[in-house]
Image: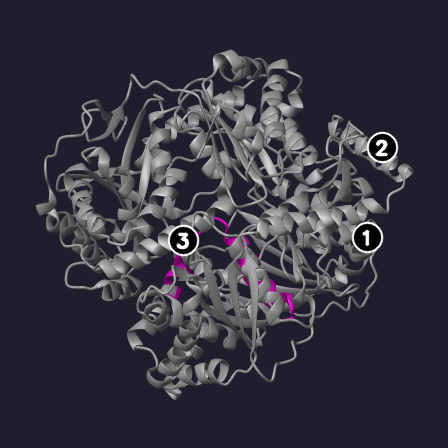
């Protein structure tokens, strides 16, 4: 997977820190045991260099070096069973053939100890991993995995070590994963020759995303003198210049222990890791000088300007305003930890939220729809950068925007920042250090990757409190500390690039033409015997892809390694006023998590499409005595964020029943409870809706965000649309989160007068924010539950005036007890459309990108049905044993498979796919394969492991008890689902395939998002949007 390391990894807001304070002192923890290591101590070929306690994050960092090869190692010992391993190499390509990216794909295709094809994808089904992937950034390649099972950790470590250090790198794998010339139909030598390959198609997809394209150009042009001037993921037209020999050479020079950094995290003992890494890999190498360091980018003596073009966006809120303009500044070396910390804080102060100077100066005048896709501090390159600009703007505003950017820096130097905003930002860091996420190891690995890659000190980066202290001190000593930085880095910096991008109507055509020219150039040099050779190799590859694989060389867990029972999460039911409340006591580290589910049952049908917009603006328009700026400031100072989202919850027993509502979510430090509830009270009692200027800003950025998301999540939009006519819940999901919502928001963004929307929002509020149809949930530490209950009581009293008995719009309401063991108690109200008639529909959305997203969904059975478990296992097995080979290996799509959804829909999908008809036929063949029963007990066991790794993925303290609160799925129901999964047999799988997926038995829907398609246009069975 190619990862554009935009600012995301370096920004603290993408890191969630966690830990349990009371455990830090009581018992001998992993972190305490690790403090016993001594600098200079020798362990299995490594020498300990440093041991540091990091109490902020409840861990101990142990830094080591490998004596023989110089490999660097960091271990973070922490009481977390979700252990992580990662190895990263500094990969600094000097051309855009995508060699590090294609290598990342190819090393995972087989190795010395594990010579079978594609051990990486096979291990997904032989392990209980909680994460397995690989990333290519612009200057490193990283291979991380995590698992909660110690035996599994050793298995995966073996496979990963062998893959990166001793890969087979077969020419055939290079053709499949990288690029190849092949007959369009490999079995027909007279069909035309075309480019194929997984990375080739993946990058064509990536380059069809305008935000991604812009970010790539910006980096290439801001750092023009070394590795950052090329596309590490591969420029589609340069990929066919890469040879197999060059790929092998790049591996030999970059994938060496002397160029490697190992990171392990969790509660497993360090010695075991070191021993295995030394024995299986490092002992077989001598030290080399990898010579991969990135030199500093020479500073320009004067600023530069440049322009690029992109494809037009049919979904852009305003067709006449599709330009992007951004100014980027080269900053200092990221290995200076404190400077990086300061600049990242400074960046947030300048651009985050409605109180920031650039938001006021650029977003509020509505010159564009949103900030440019690259914005703020980015510490993912050796020297950091800062970017500021707009997307969705008109060409004639270019000079004005440049003028505003320059003026805003002057204003900041003049007047600085309010102290309260700085405090709000430091409060945010405090919350992030306390919040517990489930993939903390992965967050840490990503957080330190760039700095460590350039030989910075990762341990120093983890000492966040000391940076905060130093920052406060710097501000005390020099009140103009931040203004001086702005002056130095922005006002007086001559290394700045102004890059504009505008749409070109014929952009896609030109791309296709350039690809065709490249193809013809390759073809012209071919002799007849070359063509014959290509045909022969195409057949060989097809044969290899079609052959049943023997994976017996790979290690595997057994179904008997899976815990038979789930741990029970105790919850208490109570009430506040008339409102039911679920309390769940959890080690939340001093944070309180609050949720409220509000029913939509009384909302008139004509308002449904507006609900997502209502959710996105209700917490951002101001309320009570606060305007939207003051409200945003209070939220930052007092909470970990407050949000509202739509919820469509299919019933677990009935396909045509569902609950509809909106979910209010927020969190805060225990000391801020009264403030958090006061903010919610104001939103219930007196939200502001009348500021049309503010609303327009929010509408435009929301419409822009939806339009931008499609090229990334096209398969989700295709799946949502394909399920639209199969269940009532599916229909509502399409309205709230599908293409229908994208088109609706585009219409709203195009309105010249938002008066009608402003009149609609209070109507929705009357129906939604009503204590009469609401239930709440609180997750907090045991000590804080009674305190929270008292505050919650007060909140419900404060909002009592919003209480109305309103009639449901639909008569068919079914009540379900909130506590299944007590049917006399409180209930949730579901809508039953028992006379719902599902029907088949095939929908095609023409899109401005060169690849397809294809989906087919079939109506099957709900969660508590006895066949649901068989369909879950079937989906995983079909994906791993059939669809992956057909759609990715043979078809060249980036991904594809089947999944069983909780709403009773069995869905097939493909991602960034060059094909349409071939993929739909692969879905069909997958069903035939399942019905024929041509699979083994081993295949079934592997699919079960894969299902269980999802079922048992870790749940954060903030989210414990949530499935019960939202969907009424209790631990007992989960346990019986678990038992049904264990008992799935060959026979039950074949039966389920026949009963639900066979052509005569099923009701299905199909949806495709992709480029213009003549065959579909001419086919009357398709609806073209």
Q: Camera-side residue: 230 or 991? A: 230
Residue at 14% x, 47% y is 796
Q: Is residue 675 left or right of residue 911?
A: left
Q: Is residue 167 left or right of residue 349?
A: right
Could you tell me if residue 110 is visible in this image?
Answer: no
- Determine the image quadrant of residue 812: top left
Q: Using the image, determine if residue 581 lies above or below residue 379.
A: above
Q: Camera-side residue: 504 or 693? A: 504
Dominant SS type (magenta): helix
* Foreground: disc 1 or disc 2: 2
Q: Camera-side residue: 766 or 265? A: 766
Q: Using the image, determine if residue 429 lies above or below residue 332.
A: above
Which element is circle 1 on? Answer: helix
Q: Using the image, determine if residue 724 lies above or below residue 988.
A: below
Residue on which the image places disc 3: 704
Q: In this view, does 704 lie to the left or right of 822?
A: right
**Alpha carbon distance from label 1 to label 2:** 23 Å
């Amino acid at each position: 997977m190619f990862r554009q390391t935009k600012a995301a990894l370096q920004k603290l807001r993408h890191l969630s820190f966690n830990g349990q304070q009371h455990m830090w002192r009581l018992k001998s923890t992993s972190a305490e045991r690790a403090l016993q290591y001594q600098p200079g101590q020798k362990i299995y070929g490594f020498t300990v260099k440093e041991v540091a306690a990091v109490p902020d994050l409840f861990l101990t960092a142990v830094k080591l070096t490998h004596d023989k090869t110089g490999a660097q190692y960091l271990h973070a010992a922490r009481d977390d069973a979700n252990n992580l391993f990662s190895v990263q190499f500094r990969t600094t390509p000097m051309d855009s053939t995508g060699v590090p990216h294609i290598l990342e794909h190819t090393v995972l295709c087989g190795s010395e100890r594990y010579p079978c094809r594609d051990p990486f994808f096979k291990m997904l089904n032989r392990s209980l991993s909680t994460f397995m992937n690989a990333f290519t950034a612009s200057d490193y390649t990283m291979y991380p995995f995590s698992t909660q099972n110690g035996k599994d950790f050793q298995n995966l470590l073996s496979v990963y070590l062998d893959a990166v250090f001793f890969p087979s790198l077969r020419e055939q794998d290079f053709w499949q994963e990288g690029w190849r010339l092949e007959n369009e139909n490999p079995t027909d030598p007279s069909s035309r020759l075309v480019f194929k390959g997984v990375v080739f198609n993946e990058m064509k997809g990536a380059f069809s995303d305008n935000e991604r394209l812009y970010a790539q150009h910006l980096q290439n042009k801001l750092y023009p003198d070394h590795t950052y001037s090329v596309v590490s993921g591969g420029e589609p037209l340069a990929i066919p210049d890469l040879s197999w020999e060059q790929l092998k050479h790049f591996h030999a020079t970059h994938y060496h222990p002397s160029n490697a950094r190992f990171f392990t995290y969790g509660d497993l003992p360090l010695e075991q890791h070191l021993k295995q890494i030394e024995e299986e890999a490092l002992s077989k190498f001598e030290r080399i000088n990898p010579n991969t360091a990135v030199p500093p980018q020479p500073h320009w003596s004067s600023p530069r300007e440049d322009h690029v073009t992109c494809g037009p966006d049919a979904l852009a809120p305003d067709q006449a305003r599709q330009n992007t303009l951004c100014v980027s500044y080269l900053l200092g070396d990221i290995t200076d930890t404190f400077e990086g910390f300061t600049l990242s804080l400074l960046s947030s102060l300048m651009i985050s939220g409605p109180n920031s100077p650039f938001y006021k100066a650029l977003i509020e005048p509505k010159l564009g729809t949103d900030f440019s896709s690259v914005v703020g501090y980015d510490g993912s390159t050796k020297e950091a950068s800062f970017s500021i600009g707009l997307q969705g703007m008109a060409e004639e505003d270019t000079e004005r925007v440049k003028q505003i950017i320059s003026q805003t820096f002057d204003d900041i130097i003049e007047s600085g920042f309010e102290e309260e905003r700085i405090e709000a930002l430091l409060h945010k860091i405090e919350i992030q250090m306390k919040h517990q996420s489930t993939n903390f190891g992965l967050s840490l690995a990503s957080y330190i990757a760039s700095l460590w890659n350039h030989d910075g000190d990762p341990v120093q980066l983890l000492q966040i409190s000391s940076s905060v202290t130093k920052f406060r001190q710097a501000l005390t000593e020099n009140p103009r500390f931040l203004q001086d930085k702005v002056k130095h880095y922005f006002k007086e910096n001559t290394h700045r690039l102004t890059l504009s991008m505008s749409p070109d109507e014929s952009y896609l055509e030109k791309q296709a033409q350039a690809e065709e020219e490249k193809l013809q150039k390759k073809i012209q040099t071919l002799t007849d015997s070359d063509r014959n050779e290509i045909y022969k190799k195409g057949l060989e590859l097809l044969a290899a892809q079609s052959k049943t694989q023997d994976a017996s060389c790979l290690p595997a867990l057994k179904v008997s390694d899976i815990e038979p029972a789930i741990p029970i999460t105790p919850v208490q039911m109570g009430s506040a006023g008339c409102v039911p409340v679920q309390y769940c006591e959890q080690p939340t580290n001093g944070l309180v998590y609050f949720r409220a589910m509000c029913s939509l049952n009384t909302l008139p049908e004509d308002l449904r499409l507006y609900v997502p917009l209502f959710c996105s603006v209700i917490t951002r328009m101001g309320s009570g005595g606060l305007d939207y700026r003051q409200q945003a400031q209070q939220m930052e100072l007092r909470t970990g964020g407050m949000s509202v989202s739509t919820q469509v919850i299919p019933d677990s027993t009935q396909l045509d029943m569902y609950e509809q509502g909106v979910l209010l979510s927020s969190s805060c430090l225990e000391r801020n409870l009264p403030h958090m509830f006061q903010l919610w009270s104001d939103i219930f009692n007196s939200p502001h809706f009348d500021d049309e200027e503010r609303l327009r800003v929010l509408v435009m950025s929301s419409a822009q965000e939806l339009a931008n998301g499609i090229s990334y999540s096209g398969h989700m939009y295709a799946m949502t649309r394909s399920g639209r006519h199969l269940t009532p819940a599916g229909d509502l999901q399409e309205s709230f989160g599908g293409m229908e919502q994208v088109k609706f928001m585009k219409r709203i963004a195009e309105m010249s007068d938002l008066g009608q929307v402003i009149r609609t929002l209070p109507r929705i509020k009357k129906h939604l924010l009503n204590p009469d149809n609401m239930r709440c949930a609180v997750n907090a530490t045991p000590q804080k539950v009674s305190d929270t209950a008292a505050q919650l009581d007060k909140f419900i009293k404060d909002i009592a005036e919003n209480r109305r008995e309103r009639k449901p719009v639909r008569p068919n309401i079914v009540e379900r007890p909130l506590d299944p063991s007590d049917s006399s108690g409180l209930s949730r109200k579901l809508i039953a459309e028992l006379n719902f008639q599902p029907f088949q529909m095939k929908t095609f959305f023409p899109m401005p990108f060169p690849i397809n997203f294809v989906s087919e969904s079939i109506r099957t059975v709900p969660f508590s049905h006895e066949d649901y478990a068989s369909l879950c296992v079937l989906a995983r097995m079909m994906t791993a044993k059939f669809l992956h080979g057909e759609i990715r290996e043979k078809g060249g799509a980036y991904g594809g498979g089947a999944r069983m959804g909780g709403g009773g829909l069995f869905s097939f999908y493909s991602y960034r796919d060059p094909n349409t008809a071939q993929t739909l036929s692969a879905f069909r063949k997958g069903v035939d394969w399942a019905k024929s029963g041509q699979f083994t007990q081993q295949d079934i066991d592997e699919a079960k492991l894969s299902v269980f790794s999802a079922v048992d993925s870790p749940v954060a303290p903030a989210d414990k008890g949530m499935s019960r609160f939202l969907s009424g799925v209790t631990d007992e129901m989960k346990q019986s689902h678990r038992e049904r999964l264990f008992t799935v047999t060959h026979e039950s799988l074949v039966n389920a395939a026949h009963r639900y997926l066979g052509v005569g038995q099923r009701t299905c829907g199909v949806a495709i998002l992709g480029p213009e398609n003549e065959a579909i246009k001419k086919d009357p069975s398709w609806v073209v949007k």
